[in-house]
Image: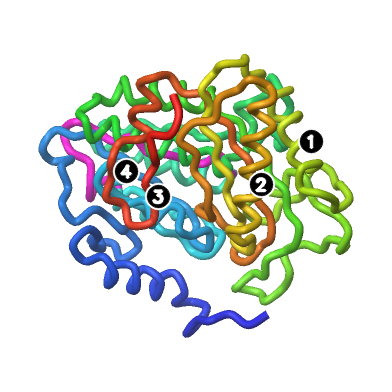
Amino acid sequence: MKKLFNTKERMPDDMIDGFVAAYPDLICRGADPRVVRRKMLRTKEGKVALLIGNGSGHEPIAMGFVGEGLLDANVVGDVFAASSPDAILEGIEEVCGDAGAVLLISRHEGDVINGNAAALMAQDDGLNVQPLLMYDDISSAPKGQEDERRGAAGTMFIYKILGAAAEEGMQIEDLMTLGAEVRAATRTLGAAVSPGVSPLTGELMFTLPEDEVFIGMGVHGEPGVGRRKVGPVQDLVVYMLGELLEDRAIEAGTPTVVLVNGAGGTTMMELLTIYGEVHRQLGEKGIEPVSPMIGSYSTTQEMGGFSISLFTPTPQMLALWRAPHKAPHFPHITAQGA
């Protein structure tokens, strides 16, 4: 499959060039060219910094979520490769003030190793940096072993809620507690219908028969946990919601935020159809969907597929989820429901 780039080596840097050029009033590069940060930082004025390092190729996450009310910085790695500890340290030093910094780490092996190493180096330098591990993918470890699960699209609840809370002045200990509570209230399950192509190799990331769907496919094309035959989307949603609610039950009457995230090659027509089924089926169980997020935000190139995330917020979390922001590629969240 054709890809549009200058050279493979320059792909992340050329992407950052375009991003910074598109939003010069909001975004700038840091001292390290792989650090993308808010142009107007408040972290030197008492605000806790919020940042993450992650591999490129999954946009708009996380670079597109840098901005007021969300991330203070994103340290961009190579395609599908964790940012180096040294680069993450550069990002921490760029944004961290006296109030400290929360370093978000999506639970994938390279991200965990490099993120924790950067946090330790920053702490050795006298900076108050706390790493927060994010995970939500129920297909990657069984119930009862939640802390062994992969980070998936549901981590975006942590980005937004902690970003809004930090903007309002919440201090680092409370942010860490809030992040853990949001994580505990989130579950995600994905499905893939067609592979993406690695921009590095030009090869398909996996193979799948035309009449099958992978359940539990990871954001790097990691193997799923099972397959189902292609059929009506309502049947697939019934199955996926059943797995999510089996892992973490939601009582009738509980306000629930639904995130339907496209993997990169799934149309909005399909995503809205999926959300319609989720909304209907939750309603039949007496569960109240509120303030949904629907679109392709955590992607794997042009992989066809989607994930469903269910999040049961407290009133405080819901208000933070709906709070205004100025991040270029994070959607406006409506106050629908509850």
Choose between 172 and 159: the one closer to the eye. Answer: 159
Do labels 4 and 2 touch, CB within 8 Å?
A: no
Marks 3/4: CA–CA distance: 12 Å
Q: Is residue 107 above or below residue 176?
A: below
Q: Is residue 22 above or below residue 184?
A: below
Residue bearing mark 1: 239
Residue bearing mark 4: 70
Of mark 1 and mark 2, the one earlier in the sequence is 1
The magenta span reads: 92-108
Marks 4/1: CA–CA distance: 33 Å
Choose between 113 and 173: the one closer to the eye. Answer: 173
Q: Is residue 74 magenta?
A: no
Q: Secondary structure beneath disc 2? A: helix
Q: Amino acid at mark 4?
A: Leu
Query: Looking at the picture, how far across and down is residue 65, in whole percent?
Result: 37, 51
Res 249 → quadrant: top right
Residue bearing mark 2: 274
Do labels 3 and 1 touch, CB within 8 Å?
A: no
Q: Amino acid at mark 1?
A: Tyr
Q: Secondary structure beneath disc 4? A: loop
From where the camera sits, is residue 127 visible?
no
Q: Amino acid at mark 3?
A: Pro
